[in-house]
Amino acid sequence: MSKGVTEEFRKRGPWQAVAGVVLAAWVVLTAAVAETGTPQVLVATAATGAMLCLCPVAGGLVARRVTGAVPAARLRHVFVVLEGAALALLFPFYWFAFSVEPVGRPGALAVGVVVSLVVPVVVALVLALRTSLLVHRIVVAEFGPLVPDAAAPALVPRIRVLGTLLVVAGSVLSVSVVVLAFTSPSRWLLLEAFGLVVTLTPVVLGLSLTRVDDVRSARRRNIGAYIVVPTAAGYAAAELVSAGGAAGMLFGALVLAATVLLIGAILVLREFTGSWERPWRVSR
């Protein structure tokens, strides 16, 4: 990686930070001037959206310290954490946004307000993901793959430990959802069933990872597809969080914990397998 590319990345940092501030201000201003039938949900939506917009702000400020490949390697994990934070914040934002209702029309969606909130959040998410990818490429171009073939066998036990942790944590979350279902109104049982599916997803992924034989087999597992489950359960989460009181908030916290667990597992497994820089090895 040429020095000019690293310098270009460093120079784009302040511009990204400014863009993140503008996007966060856009979200806050939209929430301030919008009139909805669910003002508290609107505040929660704007709060999570604004926090997500701050992730590229932090990334842009840190980018100023990337003066070469060595600082990029040292700071790479900071960008990975910011990437994970942005992905994790996207889900509560998405759930709250689905519950923003127009004035006088309960049960409907305030489409105009939601779209105005979604646009800056999506842009901020792309900035956070893009920055992490660029730093990754700088490091790999200078130092080679993060996971050399010689080091791959030593990572298999770590992948299996990660799988075990997912099984244990996911089981605890699943049991919590079942207990909550027995103490909640019967009309919520179907919605809580979606929550059980989400909390069981880390368990399924963990069982898959405990059976890996080598890093190459771990690369072949499309773990990103597991995020489809909490995404599809967004409607159930939105309904219970907005109308379920304390029980609904607890349900949302359990589903969010399972989602964060999945996102963390995806990022950690990517670190263990170095899947970004060697996609051609997946099919072998």
Image (cartoon, helix red, strand yellow):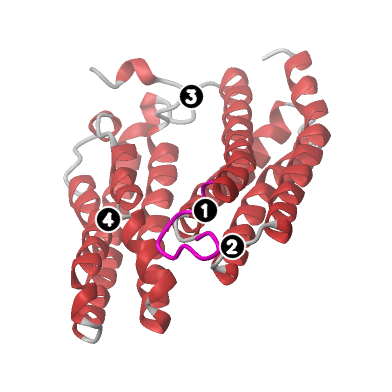
Q: Main secondary structure of the magenta part?
A: loop
| Kind of residue at disc 1 | Ala
The mark found on residue 261 in the picture is: none
Q: CA distance from mark 4 to mark 1?
A: 33 Å
> Nearer the N terminus, badge 4 or badge 1?
1
**Mark on residue 202?**
4
* CB-based contact (under 8 Å), mark 2 and mark 1: yes
Q: Which of pointers 2 and 4 indicates the residue nearer the eye?
A: 2
Relative to 228, 178 lies left or right: left
Write down the quadrant of residue 35 in the picture: bottom right
Q: Is 29 placed left or right of 86 in the picture?
A: right
Amino acid type indicated by mark 2: Thr
Residue pictured at 73% horizontal, 57% vertical: 33
Region rendered in magenta: 101-111
Tell me the distance, in whole angstroms, between the alpha carbons under discs 3 and 1. 47 Å
Q: Are marks 4 and 1 in contact (CB under 8 Å)?
A: no
Asked which secondary structure carries label 3, the reply is loop
N-terminal of the pair, mark 2 or mark 1, is: 2
Residue count near mark 2 (Cα–Cα under 10 Å), binned few <14, some 14–19, many ≥20: many
Position of residue 142 measured from the top left corner of the image (x, y, whole percent): 62, 20
Graded by Cα atoms within 10 Å as few (under 14), some (14 to 19) or many (20 or more), the crowding at tag 3 reads: some
Q: Name the residue furthest front.
A: 104
Is residue 9 or residue 123 the one in the foreground? 123
Q: Which residue is mark 1?
A: 110
Q: Tag 2, which secondary structure? A: loop
Q: Residue at x 35, y 48 (%)?
A: 231
Q: In the image, what residue type sits under mark 3?
A: Pro
Q: Earlier in the sequence, mark 3 or mark 2?
A: 2
